[in-house]
Image (spheres, rainbow, N blue to C red):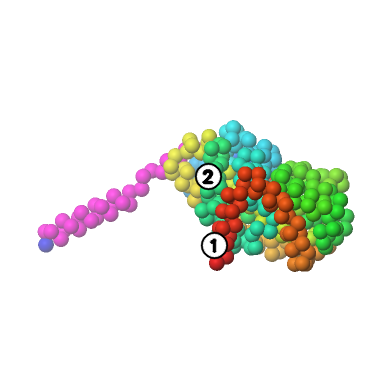
């Protein structure tokens, strides 16, 4: 009998030890989170979700201040602010990271992903995480990938039903050599421009068109200055949530854990929200007067074949291994 009571007391003592949670180490912080789209977009909603999640996790000790519509600068300007420690967090396009880690251009290769499922598996799996880790030596910490989405063409001149229709069209592209080479190959006249300058450039007819996911075309009201939409889905574009390494290294283990948990939850929220918004976007754009062209598989195959020189040029420019690794990863997922 005595032994049983002794054992019971020991077990209860151990159990109480296990439940004593250490007082989590959260300092009071104000965190600036910059992004390029407007508040009422898939990007803006996910930033708010992340901010609310972190505030809750830290007992409101942290205040995430969200700055949308590129009010803290373009993607490259915010990347530099993070590296210098003048800003804490941002989300932007992986395409604009190529000036820091050129391997990120692999995500801009045309017609690489067949669907979102493949993209999620690659980005969240060993390939995407290994690429993200390369940012650390450059002063950035990659937290998670969000979905920008499959990119489609819009313009103000005429319907684009085949590659030849792009001949001479002044098409705004992200500041990234693969997009420039790709659209030159299609016969367009690519104009690299920051996202924050795009609406005004289309309104002033400084450019005829652009290419973005339909969620962005809808939430940024591009239908006000663009008549024609061609569904090409020529690139799957990820967003990446980045933290300043200078700032990150000063966080406690509890704070890092709280940020990562909120980042993963925001990733899952954003992808779901983005896909729901995408399902509704076409109907909204049609109702706003856009003329929508479903580009045929035959024409898409012709476009894909035309992009081979752009892909080869990227691979031969020191990126053979990362291209091979991505193709192998996708092949594995498709098995
Ligand atoms: O901050 C805006 C970025 O998220 C940008 O990447 C959006 O896809 C985009 C583009 O075309 O610039």
Residue 213 location (% of width, % of height): 71, 56
Q: Are marks 1 and 2 in contact (CB under 8 Å)?
A: no
Left or right, 86 with respect to 302, comes to: left
Calculate the distance from the C-alpha at mark 1 to the C-alpha at mark 2.
Answer: 22 Å
At x 69%, y 38%, the residue is 73
Front tag of 1 and 2: 1
Residue at the far left in the pictured view: 2
Does label 1 or label 2 sit earlier along the sequence? 2
- Residue at image location 71% in from the left, 64% down from the top: 280
Task: For label 1, count other residues whose C-alpha is less than 10 Å away and answer few (under 14), some (14-19) or many (20+).
Answer: few
* Residue 310: percent from left, percent from top: 72, 50
Of residues 129 and 221, the one nearer the viewer is 129
Question: Residue drawn 65% across and 44% down?
Answer: 317
- In this rendered view, identify the residue nearer to me: 222 or 311: 311
Ligand 1 under 8 Å from disc 2 Cβ: no
> From what the image shows, is residue 184 above or below residue 248?
below
- Residue nearer the viewer, 37 or 331: 331
- Mark 1, secondary structure of its residue: helix
Residue 176 image offset from top left, x and y in percent: 71, 45
Q: Quadrant of the N terminus?
A: bottom left
Q: Quadrant of the C terminus?
A: bottom right
224 magenta-colored: no
Query: Quadrant of the rendered structure where residue 288 is?
Result: bottom right
Residue 318 seen: yes
- State the SS at label 2: helix
Q: Magenta segment range?
A: 2-30
**Residue pointed to by mark 1:** 332
Is 23 inside the magenta-drawn segment? yes
Residue behind mark 2: 133
């Amino acid at each position: 009998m005595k032994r049983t009571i002794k054992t019971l007391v020991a077990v209860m003592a151990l159990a109480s030890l296990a439940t004593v949670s250490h007082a989590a180490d959260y300092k009071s912080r104000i965190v600036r989170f910059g992004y390029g789209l407007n508040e009422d977009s898939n990007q803006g909603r996910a930033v708010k979700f992340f901010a609310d999640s972190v505030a809750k996790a830290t007992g409101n000790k942290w205040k995430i201040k969200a700055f949308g519509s590129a009010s803290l600068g373009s993607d490259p300007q915010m990347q530099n602010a993070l590296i210098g420690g003048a800003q804490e967090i941002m989300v932007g396009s992986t395409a604009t990271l190529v000036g820091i880690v050129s391997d990120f251009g692999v995500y801009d290769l045309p017609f690489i992903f067949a669907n979102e499922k493949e993209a999620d598996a690659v980005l969240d799996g060993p390939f995407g995480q290994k690429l993200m880790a390369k940012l650390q030596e450059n002063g950035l910490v990659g937290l998670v990938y969000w979905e920008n989405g499959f990119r489609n063409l819009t313009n103000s001149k005429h319907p684009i039903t085949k590659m030849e229709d792009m001949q001479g069209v002044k098409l705004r592209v992200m500041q990234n050599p693969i997009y420039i080479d790709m659209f030159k190959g299609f016969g367009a006249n690519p104009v690299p421009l920051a996202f924050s300058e795009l609406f005004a450039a289309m309104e002033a007819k400084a450019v005829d068109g652009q290419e973005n996911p339909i969620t962005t075309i809808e939430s940024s009201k591009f239908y006000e200055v663009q008549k024609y939409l061609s569904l090409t889905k020529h690139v799957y574009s990820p967003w990446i949530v980045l933290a300043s390494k200078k700032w990150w290294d000063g966080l406690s283990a509890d704070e890092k854990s709280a940020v990562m948990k909120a980042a993963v939850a925001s990733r899952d929220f954003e992808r779901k929200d983005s896909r729901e918004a995408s399902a509704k976007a076409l109907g909204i754009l049609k109702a706003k007067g856009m003329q929508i062209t479903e580009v045929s598989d035959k024409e898409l195959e012709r476009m894909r074949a035309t992009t081979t020189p752009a892909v080869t040029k990227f691979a031969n420019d020191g990126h053979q291994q990362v291209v091979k690794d991505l193709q192998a990863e996708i092949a594995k997922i498709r098995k």
